[in-house]
Image (tube, grey):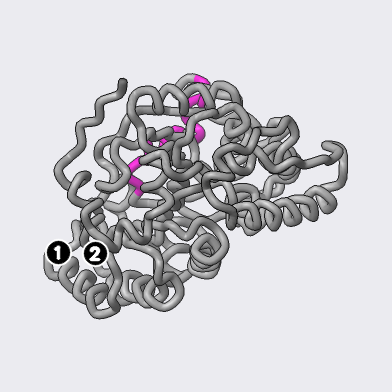
Amino acid sequence: MVFRVLRPDSVSVWKNEEILNRFSKYRGIIDGTQVARYLIAKTVKCEYNSNDTIENLEKLLKEKSLEYNDLLKKDVEEIKYRKTVPNSYVNLAETLANNYLKNCIFCERQCEVNRIDGKKGFCLISKDSYVSSAFLHMGEEPHLVPSGTIFFQGCNFGCVFCQNYDISQAWKGKRDIDDIAQKVNTKQLAAIAEKLVDRGAININYVGGDPIPNIHTIVGSLIFQQSNICQLWNSNFFLTEKALSLIIDFIDFWLPDFKYGNNECAKKYSGIDNYFDVVARNHKRVHDEGSGEICIRHLVMPNHIECCSKPILDYVAKELPKAVMNIMTQYRPQWKAFNYDEINRRPTSQEMREVKSYADKLGILYEPVS
């Protein structure tokens, strides 16, 4: 038997009726009254030729997504007794993901390198995935702990203020990735996830760095995972629509960043083009087409209230009414932030009050998880 010792706020957060309402499916998986989405997807039979064209595989993926979403409308008691099939919707998604690796378009940098042949784009990750650590994280949002957190080496961003810079970018060009992280295949990643479940995790939390370069391994691991556990995507969310289509039906809970309220700040501090357009699009899609259970992380940066925090809050209030936000106070100058005077300090209490007051004005739910 697994005994979970929770922080006081991790108990009290579930007494909030609005949190229970917005995160009802996630809570149901924890309680065993709902079935994790990936388990349902493994019951959807899918006949295809793995050597077929990408276009045909994409067409079939869309068809199976429609079939899957029709299945979700059935009574949960009927869903519980469905049997896993050998060639499922998840197998199809893994096959398509590995095809994308030959001309990688997982993230919106779209490096288009052949990672199967060992080529590397901005993330410096080839076909192999590397786990830097995996543990029960007790420091996540109250409704998520204990979280079975899996940190992947490498990232598709280059944030000058990154607080995980040791695994996202500091090693690039200096150390061999094999010396600092564990290479994992799909079966090994599934074993890590199952071990975290055995230790008391209430979700499997894919993070980094960022999980985006590892979509093929993560999806493939779902074939071997067996537990009724929430699959959680913790990411900068700068992935392509095709990449999002590979995971949108398998993820139960979304924990995306919303860093910048415009494209210019993103370019300056993360080296990213079209940030707001891409990330807003992806938030909107998982809200409307995915599970819809989302906790958006916004890290408040000094001197970026008007240009970033408020536009993000405006977008969330208008387009993502089911989302909950974590308005984060944890920003501190890290990595290369010391080279930028305007962000070379923590946000002031006045700045934090202004952001939270604006969120209150817009009716955004943030207090229970912030």
Looking at the rendered structure, which numbered label has been put on residue 272? none
> Does 218 sit left or right of 8 as displayed?
right
Q: Which residue is mark 2?
A: 302
State the separation of the CA atoms marked 2 and 1.
Answer: 7 Å
Q: Amino acid at mark 1?
A: Thr
Residue at the location (43% across, 57% down)? 293
Residue at the location (65% across, 34% down)? 83
Circles 2 and 1, Cβ within 8 Å, touching? The answer is: yes
Specify the quadrant of the image occupied by residue 261.
bottom left
Q: Could one spot residue 273 in this view of the protein?
A: no
Residue at the location (30% across, 23% down)? 2
Helix, strand or loop for disc 1? loop
Residue 123's x, y, as percent? 55, 42
Give the position of the N terminus as an image quadrant. top left
Q: How many marks?
A: 2
Magenta-colored stretch includes residue 352? no
Q: Which residue is mark 1?
A: 348
Region in magenta: 162-178
Give the position of the C terminus as an image quadrant. bottom left
